Image (cartoon, grey):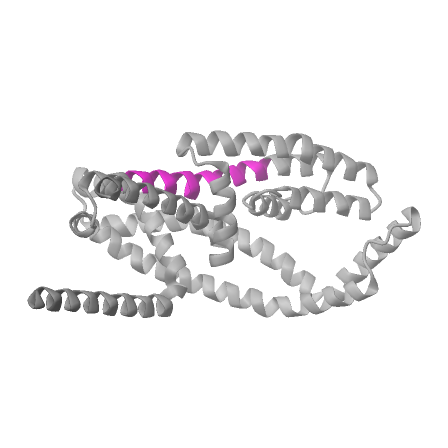
Amino acid sequence: MSNISSVKLKQVSFFILLILLGTFLFLQLSSFLPAFLGAVTFYIIMRRGMDYLTIQKKWKKSSAALLLMLLSFILVLLPIVGFINVVYSKINFAILHSNEVLMAAKNFANSIQTKYHIELISDQNLQKAGSSIAETLPQIVGATFNSLITIVMLYFMLYFLLVNYLSFEKWLYKYLPLKKENTTLIGNELKTLVLSNALGIPITAFLQGLIGAIGYLILGADDITFWFVVTCITAMVPMVGSALAFVSVAILFAANGHEVKGVLMLLYGIGVMAVLDSVFRISIQKKMGNVHPLITTFGVILGVKLFGFIGLVFGPILLSLFILLVKIYMNEFAEET
């Protein structure tokens, strides 16, 4: 009995040490979690491509990995960088000319107040807005720098995942403390989740941006490229979605004296963009992974809070994975209790 107690004590002590050390390492490296999630996401998407190039085409693993990484950079990251540059240039202009922007907002608010006797914004709120704008530029620069570091770390980890993909998967199958069928289930479900969120959400947002751009073009909005980008980005935000874009365009129309165009923009946004957004979102995500809309909504809220903009994709994946692990746990251990 004493021997058993001694072994048990050593086991528990070693387990506690592992937990403490693992927690410490996780906290120190938590800033690289978005890069790791991005690497895993790209890995799952490129997994079949690695098989095709290395097994069927007899390529070296390093060459195949570099080709797939280059394609992902051209097809995915370059458009994202372009989107960010378009938005950043406008935000930077607004910050550098914050006084003009605030005066334009004040003049518009005064005209509405005079015409309809409605106070939209007070002088005190305008002063607060000016202070907020002045503090925004350093945050944007910092966010841009952090994004560059995340991308570098993402591709650094992705290369080793792709080059060692067979041994990596064998290691997971060997050391995950689950039944073989549950390990396989996690792999299949994770692939479905990644395809549904990492591909489904951006595709839905892009289609919504195209629909919005058509409306902006017909009504004669200024800088359609910028508003297309804004619509794509806001379409990934739950609940409000692209309304953040088309309502802003409608307000700008009204502010410039085009009230009829403003009303038409609102009607187009509500009657066309909002309806098609629901159709795209439900049909595309149902086809790719049948992820429940509530999981997507709360996952996006969670992801943005944890990771910022890229949490729009990773949040739903994490939430869906948590629900999947609960199901696996019940399947793995329910019979033993």
Q: Quadrant of residue 35 in the image?
A: bottom left
Residue at 89% of width from left, 52% of height from top? 113
Q: Is residue 199 magenta?
A: yes
Tell me: 194 left or right of 235. Answer: left
Tell me: 264 left or right of 21. Answer: right
Q: Is residue 267 magenta?
A: no
Up the image or down, 138 lies above or below 256; here it is below
Residue at 25% of width from left, 51% of height from top? 162
Residue at 59% of width from left, 31% of height from top? 276
Residue 103 visible somewhere in the drawing: yes
Figure label count: 0
Most foreground residue, 302 or 20: 20
Q: Residue 56: x percent and y percent? A: 18, 37
Residue at 73% of width from left, 37% of height from top? 266
Predominant SS of the magenta segment: helix
Up the image or down, 62 lies above or below 123; here it is above
Q: Which residues are magenta?
A: 187-210
Q: Residue 322: x percent and y percent? A: 37, 47
Q: Residue 143: x percent and y percent? A: 51, 64
Tell me: 208 left or right of 179. Answer: right
Most foreground residue, 236 or 153: 236
Q: Quadrant of the N terminus?
A: bottom left
Q: Quadrant of the C terminus?
A: top left
Up the image or down, 214 lies above or below 300; here it is above
Up the image or down, 261 lies above or below 315; here it is above
Residue 49 visible somewhere in the drawing: no
Q: Residue 179: x percent and y percent? A: 19, 42
Tell me: 103 left or right of 236. Answer: right
